């Protein structure tokens, strides 16, 4: 059980470390609106949710870092304001007294190209715009942050091979002229939409290498990605195009205990066929004024305890520590 102050797990144990979580802030200085399907979106209020999150994380005093799971600014942000809007939200995150890790979401890419975005989000840009990385906050744990828009029709230059590969992929699977429309697609095929993307070959090889290394080092791994990786934790439309192939790599090893994501604003939780927990976090953007969606996760050797605030549901994630 999560305790109110995050110091213990209710059985007197101290966590190895803890971190703040929030997703889909999707800020824009525009009036309230709604998604295509009519779900209300509160573009200015999401900044207040973030401010309350940072205040709560700082008051906690036991958090080692924080993670935002992508979509820092909404695509409806007027494009002449994109740069300042991203800087403004990053600036709010910087009020947190610890490191903040970001990842790429589709709305980030509607606003800025990768070469501008990655430095602002302090994503280590090692190789021509790649947005995946890893870090180890404690000896026994490793966090792998995936770039779900590695192969994508958004964010790369129009004639970039990755744009062309993504457009070909979509043409072969989605017959609609609006490639964001799932009309006529059945079941899990409804994920073949332009607002999603895929992990490229090089990133897949990198993932395999990191998981092999973590296994050799007896580290547990938490995988983070803007796009959900399990249909049990998400509706069909927001899934990573080839979530199944990424999970095949993950399932080769026993080190991954949890996959965390955003993008599907309602949130969700599942345990897959290999016992890996998938927790999709509830979006800050869809919090009506005065409500919140953020939390923190206390990490133990055999569990993660997500202590959610308001719309972010608390979840205890138990796993085999070996
Ligand atoms: N059922 C749907 C859902 C979405 N679209 C298209 O995707 C765009 C983004 O959707 P949001 O839910 O994020 O607003 C939307 O503008 C549509 O083009 C759709 O066609 N059918
Ligand atoms: O944040 P959006 O606009 O990409 O919306 C994602 C939807 O939740 C996918 O169904």
Image: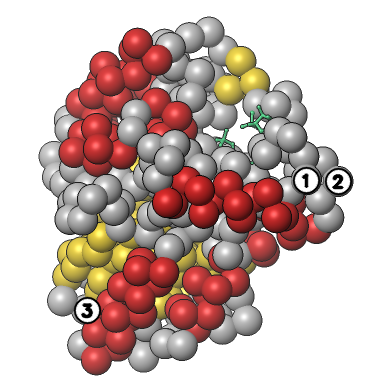
Mark 1 vs mark 3: give the one in front. Answer: 1
Residue 309 seen in render: no
Mark 1 vs mark 2: give the one in front. Answer: 1
Residue 184, disc: 2
Residue 188 seen in render: yes
Real-space CA distance between mark 1 and mark 3, rounded to the nearest whole angstrom: 46 Å
- Residue 35, position as x, y percentages in the image: 65, 26
Residue 283, disc: none
Residue 140, disc: 3
Left or right: 265 in relation to 254? right
Respond yes or no on whether mark 2 lies under 8 Å from ligand 1.
no
Q: Quadrant of ligand 1?
A: top right
Numbered disc 1: secondary structure:
loop
Q: Residue furthest top?
A: 31
Numbered disc 3: secondary structure:
loop
Q: Residues within 10 Å of mark 3 (few under 14, many from 20)?
A: some
Q: Going 17% across and 30% down the picture, which residue do you hit?
A: 95
Work out whether mark 1 precedes mark 2 in sequence or the reverse, and give the earlier one. Answer: 1
Work out whether mark 2 precedes mark 3 in sequence or the reverse, and give the earlier one. Answer: 3
Mark 2 and mark 3 residues within 8 Å of each other at the beta carbon: no
Work out whether mark 1 precedes mark 3 in sequence or the reverse, and give the earlier one. Answer: 3
Quadrant location of residue 58? top left
Numbered disc 2: secondary structure:
loop
Real-space CA distance between mark 1 and mark 2, rounded to the nearest whole angstrom: 9 Å
Respond yes or no on whether mark 1 lies under 8 Å from ligand 1.
no
Mark 1 and mark 2 residues within 8 Å of each other at the beta carbon: yes
Q: Which residue is mark 1?
A: 175
- Residue 194, position as x, y percentages in the image: 60, 42
Q: Residues within 10 Å of mark 1 (few under 14, many from 20)?
A: some
Q: Going 65% across and 45% down the picture, which residue do you hit?
A: 193
Mark 2 vs mark 3: give the one in front. Answer: 2
């Amino acid at each position: 059980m999560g305790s109110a102050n995050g110091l213990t797990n209710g059985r007197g144990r101290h966590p190895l470390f803890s971190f703040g979580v929030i997703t889909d802030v999707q800020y824009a200085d525009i009036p309230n609106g709604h998604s295509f399907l009519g779900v209300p979106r509160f573009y200015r209020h999401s900044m207040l949710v973030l401010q309350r999150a940072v205040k709560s994380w700082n008051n906690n005093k036991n958090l080692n870092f924080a993670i935002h799971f992508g979509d820092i600014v909404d695509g409806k942000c007027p494009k002449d304001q994109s740069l300042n809007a991203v800087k403004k939200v990053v600036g709010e995150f910087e009020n947190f007294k610890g490191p903040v890790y970001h990842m790429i979401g589709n709305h980030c890419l509607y606003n800025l190209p990768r070469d501008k975005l990655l430095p602002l989000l302090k994503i280590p840009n090692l190789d021509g715009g790649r947005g995946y990385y890893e870090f180890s906050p404690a000896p026994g744990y490793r966090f792998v942050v995936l770039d779900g828009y590695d192969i994508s029709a958004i964010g790369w230059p129009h004639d970039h091979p990755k744009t062309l590969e993504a457009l070909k992929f979509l043409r072969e699977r989605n017959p609609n002229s609006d490639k964001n429309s799932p009309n006529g697609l059945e079941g899990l095929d409804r994920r073949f939409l332009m607002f999603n993307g895929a992990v490229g070959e090089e990133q897949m090889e990198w993932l395999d290498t990191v998981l092999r290394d973590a296994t050799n080092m007896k580290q547990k791994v938490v995988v983070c990605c803007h796009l959900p990786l399990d249909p049990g934790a998400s509706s069909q439309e927001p899934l990573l195009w080839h979530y199944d192939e990424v999970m095949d790599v993950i399932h080769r090893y026993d080190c991954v205990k949890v996959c965390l994501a955003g993008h599907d604003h309602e949130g969700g939780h599942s345990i897959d066929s290999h016992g890996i927990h998938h927790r999709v976090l509830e979006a800050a953007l869809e919090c009506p004024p005065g409500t919140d969606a953020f939390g923190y996760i206390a990490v133990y050797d055999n569990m993660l305890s997500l202590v959610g605030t308001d719309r972010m549901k608390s979840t205890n994630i138990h796993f085999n520590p070996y």
